[in-house]
Amino acid sequence: MGVFGTAWDALTALVGAIMGLLPHLLHHVGLLGGAVLVTGATGNVLFAVVGLVFSIPLLRRLHRRFDSWKAPALALGVFALMFSLSAFVIGPAISNGDQERVPVRTVDPDEHEGHHG
């Protein structure tokens, strides 16, 4: 593995770490600001775009390996199917479809600072 490969691995590790920290960091946007970004239609579109962007290297490798756009197209189809299943079937099923009665959690500033120490 050359310098480019090592740099690419470091970059993908950094992106993975950022994506892992993102849910925690979003609650600093505000009580509802972070939730707005990752729920409902906005969250579905956001995660669909992120998923597509991060699948580009895989799609390029599939294209090079099979020397055709059929394999990447099939992979995108599977991605769209699984994403749709998650967003439109599993998500609503686990949320009971009752967005009206979701309790709003208030955070005590002293308690919030405690997990940053």
Image (tube, rainbow, N blue to C red):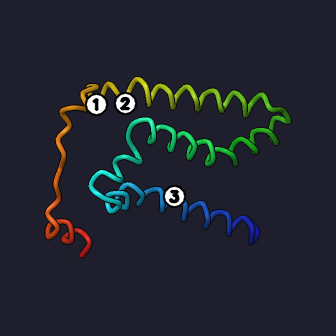
Q: Which mark is residue 16?
A: 3
Q: Residue at x 37, y 30 (%)?
A: 91
Check disc 3 and give the amino acid type.
Answer: Gly
Which secondary structure, mark 2? helix
Three-letter code, disc 1: Ser
Task: Pick whichever of labels 1 and 3 is earlier in the sequence.
Answer: 3
Is 3 left or right of 108, judged from the image as shown? right
Say which residue label 1 marks. 95
* Quadrant into which the C terminus falls: bottom left
Category of crowding for the residue at label 2, using alpha-carbon neighbours closer than 10 angstroms: few (below 14), some (14–19), many (at least 20): some
Q: Which residue does the image show at 17% across and 50% down from the upper left?
A: 105
Q: CA distance from mark 2 to mark 3?
A: 23 Å
Give the camera-side residue of 13 and 100. Answer: 100
Please tell me which of labels 2 and 3 falls first in the chain.
3
Q: Residue at x 57, y 43 (%)?
A: 51
Task: Provide residue 63's location: percent of width, then percent of height.
Answer: 79, 39
The residue wearing badge 2 is: 91
